[in-house]
Image (cartoon, grey):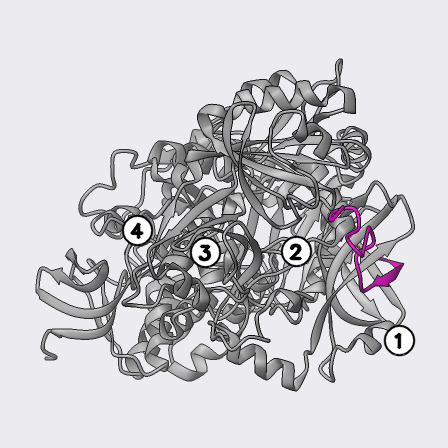
Amino acid sequence: MTSFPSHADIVVVGGGIMGCSVAYHLAKLNKNVVLLERGQLTCGSTFHAAGLVGQLRSSATITELLGDSVALYDSLEEETGQATGWKMNGGLRLACNQERLTELKRQATTARSFGLEMHILSPQEAQDMWPLMTIHDVVGAAFLPTDGAASPTDVTMALAKGARMHGATLLENCPVTGVSIENGAVAGVQTAQGAIQCEVLVNCCGQWARAFGAMAGVNVPLVSIEHQFLVTEKFDVPRDLPTLRDPDRLTYYKEEAGGLIMGGYEPNPIPWAEQGIPDGFVFKLLESNFDQFQQLAELAMPRVPALETIGVRQLLNGPESFTPDGNFILGEAPEVQRYFVGAGFNAFGIAAAGGAGKALAAWIVDGEPPYDLWPVDIRRFGRPHQDTRWVRTRTQEMYAKHYTISWPFEEDDSGRPLRMSPLYEKLRTAGACFGEKLGWERPNWFAPEGVEPKDVYSFGRQNWFEHVAVEHQRTREAVSVFDQTSFAKFLVVGRDAEKALDWICAGDTRKPRGRLTYCQMLNSRGGIECDLTVTRLADDRFYIVTGTGFATHDLHWIRQGIPPGLNAHVVDVTSAYACIALMGPRSRAVLAAVTDADVSNEAFPFFTMQEIGVAGAPSMALRVTYVGELGWELHVPVEFATTVYDALLAAGQPHGIGPAGYRAIESLRLEKSYLVWGTDINPNHTPLEAGLGFAVKLKTDVDFLGRAALERQKKDGITKRLAGFTVDDPNAVLLGRETLYRDGERVGYLTTAGWGYTLQKNIGFGYVHHPGGATRDFLRSGSYELEIATERMPATLHLQPLYDPKMDRIKC
């Protein structure tokens, strides 16, 4: 009998499919791994999973991750000798109305953009593949041939066997009772059988992950929700039947032992274990709730008439973990160093676990994500997600929307309003239609008098289109005021603050007091981890501004990036300052009317900061823009925000001032080729590839994280380059992820896109890939098309901003 281990490189807690996948991949990377399971392997939610494996998601890298699951399941049985039940029978998705068909066509284009095969079928072609169903209401379908299904328990046991084959130790019936933290980092765990010292801890506890994380002060935003599916008796079901998703009827189907599994996502989900999961909940199910399931059964039986007569073996009710945005959770927790999480799989854990375990193992070993994992990064969460009640409220909305149409620009409704700027009521009175990000209420657009400030969703031009045009034009021709209080704001302080930023920032922040630096923070591969501005306030004090949704991520990246031994600290001051942006060619006249400071171009140049009085309020005025016009961001203590806002509106009346929202910012920044982190740029892209080489301090002798990678890339040349594209057809609607073709060959896809009101064109950005070198000459020599909802349209390449490329309007 093997003795109880006293030490491991890495301890994985949780013996479901995710924990076993992480242990398997870490062991293959020659790490000393111990997996601890409180009961037996698969005893949590893995054993009762349905086992569908789909791949297509809205993120290219998450689609790639799911593809890694498929590749692993394809080979795992041969490697381990353990059956997995994996069948690549493909997956069908139905459309029962034209809007759903449009969604499927856009998804098919997205699939092509990501290198995934997906076909649009007629109703009859779909029925030929799935003869058990009726198609009286079907208008079309999509088929993904590489989708499939697996046996959750068998796959997990195969991963466990593979982990042991590569040297991992898996211990069952060994609950973890405590976590040791020393100097803010994981040091070990305590169990009923003894203590284990370790350098890294991985929380793969499924729906127990939140409670287990709390033992170490780590927040894991997930909750349990009841999820039911029925298993029929055996009848005439082909064993090679594809999986079927019928979203308009809220249901899914999978062949199982000659019968069917049928489940779905009802609009009124039932939360479970609101006061905590009961002790001893091992290999247990909940009581079947036939009344709750009836709504799904009534939708399913017209689709599959055999369900009306065939016997039901079991109505299985098993709680599973779900998250507030429907994506799973990976990564290093921002609260504790070397504490990693892999949990919250929203009922697609079987589909994701193979690739997610591989990605998380690489993250642990390399100390940074192997590629862009932002959509599932635990650091996408923030202050609202500390409250379990808020998390549960939002998560129930996401569960209920699992099979609803995913509309462009769709906003979530639950748990609002939560975080509000001091200007919230003034903006609401002015007709603001608010969106929400990280709990913040943010004005997306303003409805004129007589128009309801409410989004009406569609795949065409939405109801706000003409109203945003007014805000856009006013900003270009006169002056607008934007409430950007939700910006994340940090101070980096200490006598070594400059040295710390030297290493963390790719841009040169060694500038005099009052100077701004636009810069990126890179990983060791040169990929962009943060995109922000740094303002020097004093020798030992810097002010950083970054995007609303990146507050937790960027704070953690900066904090962990400060080299050991330096006297430098980062402090989150987001809630201390409101940010009121005054933008447009008349902004100087408005600002001059409410301050005694000289705001002329000579006295207050572009990319500088001055501490000035504005209507009696102390303000850090940053002359910077994200809309491509003359303007200032006024960062004022929150208690002065309404005073400053009112004064600006009053002073701006002769100049045609008005409020504008984030939809106008989006169209304005597209025309100026300003980029968005998380889409246009992310850890997969370097500044050289993104056209941001001007912001990198390669001409200095200052070393920084990622410099070596950029120098190699500069020497060897780049194989992808970001470019702009326009489509002349005004009826086309670009949303991002449209497939990009050069001379008929697929070379990339659009990262973001939209309408430019000044230029009256569709505008998008995308990376053109060419293994032989993505030179400017190569890009210019091709002819381009974009595939939009499966249809190709001519596109025009642009290698400089379409609007004011020389920045004359900004620097005046």
Q: Is residue 49 left or right of residue 250?
A: left
Q: Is residue 81 left or right of residue 139?
A: left
Q: CA distance from mark 4 to mark 2?
A: 33 Å
- The answer to whether the residue labelled 4 contacts the one labelled 2, judged by CB atoms less than 8 Å apart, is no
Q: CA distance from mark 1 to mark 3?
A: 39 Å
Amino acid under label 3? Asp
Which residue was labeled with disc 3?
A: 377
Q: Residue at x 76, y 35 (%)?
A: 475
Residue stretch rendered in magenta on the structure:
790-812
Q: Can residue 331 be spotted in the picture?
A: no
Please state the horizontal and vertical placement of residue 771, each as a whole percent of the image. 71, 82
Amino acid under label 1? Ser
Q: Is residue 388 above or below residue 242?
A: above
Judge the density around disc 3: few (<14), some (14-19), many (≥20) Cα neighbours within 10 Å. many
Q: CA distance from mark 1 to mark 2?
A: 40 Å
Q: Residue at x 42, y 42 (%)?
A: 227
Which disc number belongs to residue 92?
Answer: 2
Which residue was labeled with disc 1?
A: 781
- The answer to whether the residue labelled 4 contacts the one labelled 1, judged by CB atoms less than 8 Å apart, is no
